[in-house]
């Protein structure tokens, strides 16, 4: 019955891909950046031209493209067609203009003709590198005039009180608004560069071919595996885990072509993926192989290449008049990075789909207890459900200890089959012990409970990994973050010289209603701009600007 239901769901999803073309639109906090700054973005995934938000894909992809090609890709998790993220511009970005090419996996194949998206400008203050044919000398103002305002949005700015500026965004139209709201400093760099976007959100042109694939519950990760001696790994089992989170554990069989496919619930942030090749299903059912094998494997994440033709990107005009503004923006960027902490940002809603589901685990913070000499004594004295058993000379951890099955034992989210190695960790290295006291299923393997040992450094406490384990750097979906400014005020030592001082990427305003917020002003004075951008009703673009 379950197999038949799964097949039916897959057929429906594939049919949905054939019928529907998804279009992804992007708004950003501003148009002009320096390398090292963050691009805050809001994503709108629509069902073709219907004006409805798509619920098909759970991931959208943003590629930053210049005349030199694709400079970077960022991924964003979608919830009912909406998503948000933050992309830090690496210092490898050359000075020039970049087009944001956005798509989903289902509608992200070869481009149908030329494609263009929102154009942003990047100045690299630490490098002389320039985009090929992407920079021209300008005697005065560069670019073009910014997008014209559209109706249905009214912005009111109140009087400053104790560093807070009250702002009201009103929906004067007859349909609900889905918008992003940004407040940023309009420095000389912004004034001199101008804008390269003739329209606002709906400027993007062009579509992509459907490819018959879909990230229906999270990003689909495909890897290719082969023995380091060139031998095939077909038919063997493969664990994939993301270091740092117990929910990010998957297992699947390697196909005849040497690839394994993992349907994730979205792996968040930039993580190390740990892969372990197991020799038989018995090893999988026991949690992982406990012995070092003589076979080493190479694992590579497979990314398909498609033919995407980007329309001409206008060159960035630069002039000597920008020097002072560039120096000041670069200085503020370096100050913010020096003092930055994740606590400055506000986390938006995340849709987790790990094997643990909504189960609340038992969390033991070891700093709250008297430390015993070793982990075995800590488990015995404090941790409910987890027991240490010795079977045939082997040490084994039990979660549901009245059962015969083996638990899934993790260290920093990575399966470790050799439980004696876990108990050999210095107890001073372990920050938390997290227990899931239920039976869980991964693929078609059942585990009698899960226990995760979380270390302070997140480095597995120096446990030696066997030869059949490989580690691959992986860029997962961006954390859906906002920046309201209040956290920066609470950090007394934080010098708030940020260029973007407020960013809310997911704002819904019903018809006739208002959205109010207090904008926290930075530690400097100047001209600031409020930009409200998004969609209204059936895919109608809205755009409004107010300076103060």
Image: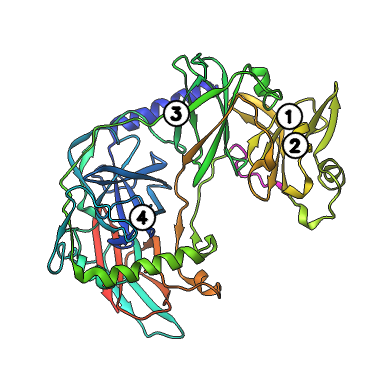
What residue is shown with label 2? 422
**Viewer-nearest residue: 395 or 117:** 395
Instruction: Please name the residue shown 60% across and 36% down the image.
Output: 355
Q: Residue at x 26, y 55 (%)?
A: 95
Tell me residue 537's x, y (percent): 28, 56
Q: CA distance from mark 4 to mark 2?
A: 42 Å
Residue placed under numbered mark 4 in the picture: 42
Is residue 176 visible in the rendered structure shown here?
no
Task: Determine if residue 127 is in view.
Answer: yes
Which comes before the other along the chain, label 2 or label 3?
A: 3
Q: Secondary structure at mark 3?
A: helix
Q: Which residue is mark 3?
A: 9
Q: How many marks?
A: 4
Provide the residue span drawn in magenta: 355-363
**CB within 8 Å, label 1 to label 2:** yes
Dot 4: element: strand
Residue 509 falls in image quadrant: bottom left
Q: Nearer the viewer, mark 4 or mark 3?
A: 4
């Amino acid at each position: 019955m379950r197999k038949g239901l799964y097949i039916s769901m897959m057929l429906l999803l594939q049919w949905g891909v054939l019928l529907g073309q998804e279009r992804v639109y992007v708004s950003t906090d501003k148009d002009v950046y320096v390398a090292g700054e963050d691009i805050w973005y809001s994503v709108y995934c629509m069902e073709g031209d219907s004006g409805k938000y798509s619920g098909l894909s759970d991931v959208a992809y943003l590629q930053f493209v210049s005349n030199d090609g694709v400079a970077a890709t960022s991924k964003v998790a979608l919830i009912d067609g909406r998503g948000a993220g933050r992309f830090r511009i690496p210092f490898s970005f050359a000075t020039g203009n970049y087009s944001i090419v956005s798509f989903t996996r289902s509608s992200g194949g070869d481009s149908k003709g030329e494609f263009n998206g929102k154009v942003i400008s990047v100045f690299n203050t630490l490098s002389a590198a320039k985009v090929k044919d992407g920079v021209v000398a300008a005697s005065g103002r560069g670019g073009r005039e910014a997008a014209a305002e559209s109706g249905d949005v009214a912005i009111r700015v109140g009087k400053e009180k104790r560093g807070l500026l009250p702002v009201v965004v009103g929906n004067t139209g007859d349909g609900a608004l889905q918008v992003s709201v940004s407040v940023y400093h309009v420095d000389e760099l912004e004034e001199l560069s101008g804008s390269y976007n003739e329209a606002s959100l709906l400027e993007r042109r062009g579509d992509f071919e459907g490819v018959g694939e879909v990230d229906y519950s999270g990003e689909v990760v495909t890897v290719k595996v082969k023995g380091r001696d060139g031998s095939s790994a077909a038919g063997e089992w493969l664990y994939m885990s993301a270091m740092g989170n117990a929910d990010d554990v998957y297992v699947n069989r390697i196909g005849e072509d040497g690839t394994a496919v993992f349907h994730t619930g979205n792996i968040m942030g930039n993580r190390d993926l740990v892969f372990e090749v197991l020799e038989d299903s018995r090893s999988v059912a026991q949690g992982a192989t406990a012995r070092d094998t003589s076979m080493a494997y190479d694992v590579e994440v497979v990314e398909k290449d498609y033919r995407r033709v980007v329309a001409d990107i206008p060159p960035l005009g630069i002039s000597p008049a920008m020097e002072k503004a560039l120096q000041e923006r670069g200085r503020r960027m370096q100050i913010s990075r020096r003092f930055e902490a994740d606590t400055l940002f506000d986390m938006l809603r995340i849709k987790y789909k790990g094997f643990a589901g909504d189960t609340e685990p038992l969390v033991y913070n070891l700093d709250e207890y008297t430390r015993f000499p070793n982990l075995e004594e800590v488990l015995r004295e404090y941790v409910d459900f987890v027991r240490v058993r010795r079977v045939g000379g082997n040490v084994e951890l039990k979660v549901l200890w009245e059962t015969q099955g083996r638990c899934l034992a993790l260290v920093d989210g990575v399966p470790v089959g050799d439980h004696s190695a876990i108990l050999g960790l210095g107890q001073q290295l372990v920050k938390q012990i997290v227990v899931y006291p239920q039976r869980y299923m991964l693929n078609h393997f059942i585990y009698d409970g899960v226990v995760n040992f979380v270390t302070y450094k997140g480095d597995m406490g120096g446990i030696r990994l066997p030869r059949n384990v490989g580690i691959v750097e992986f860029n997962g979906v961006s954390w859906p973050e906002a920046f309201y400014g209040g956290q920066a005020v609470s950090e007394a030592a934080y010098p708030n010289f940020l260029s973007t001082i407020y960013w809310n990427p997911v704002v819904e305003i019903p018809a006739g209603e208002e959205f109010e917020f207090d904008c926290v002003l930075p530690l400097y004075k100047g001209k600031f701009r409020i930009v409200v951008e998004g969609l209204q009703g059936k895919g109608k673009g809205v755009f409004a600007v107010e300076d103060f």
